[in-house]
Image (tube, grey):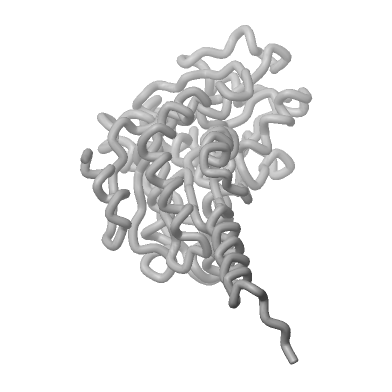
Amino acid sequence: MAACSPDGGRSGQQATQREKETERSVLVVYNAGSLARPLRAALDTFATREKAVIEQESAGSLETARKLTELGKIPDIIALADYEVFPQLLMPDFANWYVLFAQNRMVIAYTDRSRHATEITPANWWEVLLRRKVEIGRSNPALDPAGYRTLLVFQLAERYYKSDGLAERLVRSVPARNIRPKEVDLVALLQAGELDYAWEYESVARAAGLRFVQLPHEIDLGSPGDSAFYAQASVRVPGKTPSDTITFRGEPVVYAFSIPIGAPHPDVAQRFATYLMSEGKAVLRLNHLPALEQPLLVGKGAPARIAALAAGR
């Protein structure tokens, strides 16, 4: 015969409640590689305040999206380096809405040991990169937005400098051995002297203490005023199936996050999302990621507090 607790079952109810509280305190986050450091800083601050346990996974944004679409793994928060990945790969099956929350630009990162480090400038960068024995790295465009954005920059540079064939020459300047799954993987190679230059986001270069060439705003994908020029470039990458492809056009670099459909801990996810849209902006900026002053909500069905913050209320 089963034994009854002296309090008439209240101990069992309290234990169940404690289990629920423990469950709610977990936050599973999948994020772009370039978000690993700034988002971790925001997560650590949030975790201390909320007594939450953080589980963070970083990968290229396309690879991150495919964890949901191909592996069926659903996090509480998904934060990507290109907001376009949401409509292209995740909506409507895995997300109904997303919030644009930060921006960035492409740069060429290097160190004092890089070949021709004393010569490279915003005016001659492409000539330096095409010199013999210069080792250059970039990320994989099939996995990482920084990878296809690098190819977009190559196309824009050809137009901007009016140099026929420049884009293809820049593509050939990066051998297959120097292509990595995500742009942050290139930082250690630069620091070790295995690469002379790497195509990076400015936030990543600043956070790693690397030197970098700031490209003309007409080609760095960081200027909303140049959106029409950016849109002349486009890149196709693998889509939802091996036989499918999707196209990304040139546009300013903007990050976005969402709470996916079926998130295991939606309450804590909503609390973190509202934190990221308010006090968390200062934490991101301290970690070199330019948070948007006013986040922008796209789509329908977002929690009321997130919608209110996006509306400036």
> Can residue 168 be seen?
no
Q: Nearer the viewer, residue 15 or 67?
A: 15
Which residue lies at the image location 49% right of the left edge and 53% below the top edge? 78
**Residue 310, horizontal then vertical, whole percent:** 27, 44
Q: Position of residue 225 (x, y in %)?
A: 25, 29
Coordinates of residue 141 in the picture (x, y in percent): 55, 48
- Residue 242: image location, x then y, percent: 56, 69
The residue at the far top in this view is 118
Residue drawn at x 52%, y 13% is: 121
Q: Residue furthest front?
A: 6
**Considering the image in quadrants, where does the N terminus appear?**
bottom right
Q: Residue furthest bottom?
A: 1
Quarter of the image where one finds residue 153:
top left
* Camera-nearest residue between 160 and 8: 8
* Vertical order, 156 against 116 (above or below): below
How many dots with numbers? Answer: 0
| Residue 2 in sight in this render | yes
- Left or right, 4 with respect to 241, comes to right
Quadrant in the picture for residue 68: bottom right
Which image quarter is the C terminus in? top left
Depth order, front residue of 21/252: 21
Which quarter of the figure has residue 35? Answer: top right
Q: Nearer the viewer, residue 287 or 263?
A: 263
Residue beneath the point at 31% across and 30% down: 293
State left or right for residue 224 relative to residue 17.
left
